[in-house]
Amino acid sequence: MKERLSIELLTATSALAWFKYSFLPSGNLLAWVFIAMLVDLVTGIIKAWQLNEARTSAGYRKTVIKFTQYAGAVVVGVILGNALPQDYEIVSYVNDGLLVLLIYIEATSIFENLYAIDSTSQFSKYFIAPILRVLTFAIKKSPLAQQNDKDESNIIK
């Protein structure tokens, strides 16, 4: 009986491992996306508390919507990976690239929250602000962004 149970367990474990390595994106990257979302939520709550902003259900609902959108994007990637022949390695690179992009978005949001919590400290000036500029490519100070703002204001008038 024990021998039969161990063979069945080994077979089930092998099938699950094959499924994971064949169809799912990197488990480590999925875990980092979840951790980044959790840290973003916590820093957002701290920011709201620090700035005396109301924490409403609408704000928490945005986190649920964001999680749903991220999960939907990952599921679409998995479905596309299963629809294509297994010898296309590009699908795994695209799926992992999608997860890296989600981590980048969350990291940018975390640093924006940290900077909003305290923008006057030395740590914020010399550590958080430069990293935030690098993450956002200093878009607000870019001459192209300023030119687009001028063009849009001329169109509105």
Image (cartoon, rainbow, N blue to C red):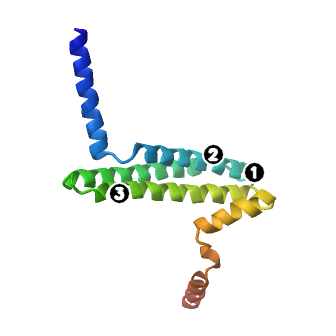
Q: Is residue 52 above or below residue 126?
A: above
Q: Secondary structure at mark 3?
A: helix
Q: Around disc 2, counting alpha carbons within 10 Å, would you say few (fewer than 14), some (14 to 19), or many (20 or more)?
A: some
For marks 1 and 3, the one nearer the N-term is: 1
**What amino acid is found at the position of numbered circle 3 in the picture?**
Tyr
**What amino acid is found at the position of numbered circle 1 in the picture?**
Gln
Residue situated furthest left in the rendering: 85
The residue under label 1 is 50
Q: Is residue 14 above or below residue 46?
A: above
Residue 68's disc number? none
Q: How many marks?
A: 3
Tell me the distance, in whole angstroms, between the alpha carbons under discs 3 and 2. 30 Å
The quarter of the image holding the C terminus is bottom right
On the rendered structure, is 106 left or right of 26?
right
Q: Are marks 1 and 3 in contact (CB under 8 Å)?
A: no
- The image position of residue 117, as x and y in percent, is 73, 55
Residue at point 41% right, 43% down? Answer: 27
For marks 1 and 2, the one nearer the N-term is: 2
Residue at point 75% right, 63% down? Answer: 126
In this view, the mark in front (1 or 2): 2
- The image position of residue 57, as x and y in percent, is 58, 47
Residue situated furthest right in the rendering: 121
Residue at point 46% right, 59% down? Answer: 101
For marks 3 and 2, the one nearer the N-term is: 2
- The image position of residue 51, as x and y in percent, is 75, 54
In this view, the mark in front (3 or 2): 3
The residue under label 3 is 93
**What amino acid is found at the position of numbered circle 2 in the picture?**
Val
On the rendered structure, is 124 left or right of 79?
right
Tell me the distance, in whole angstroms, between the alpha carbons under discs 1 and 2. 12 Å
The residue under label 2 is 42
Residue situated furthest top in the rendering: 1
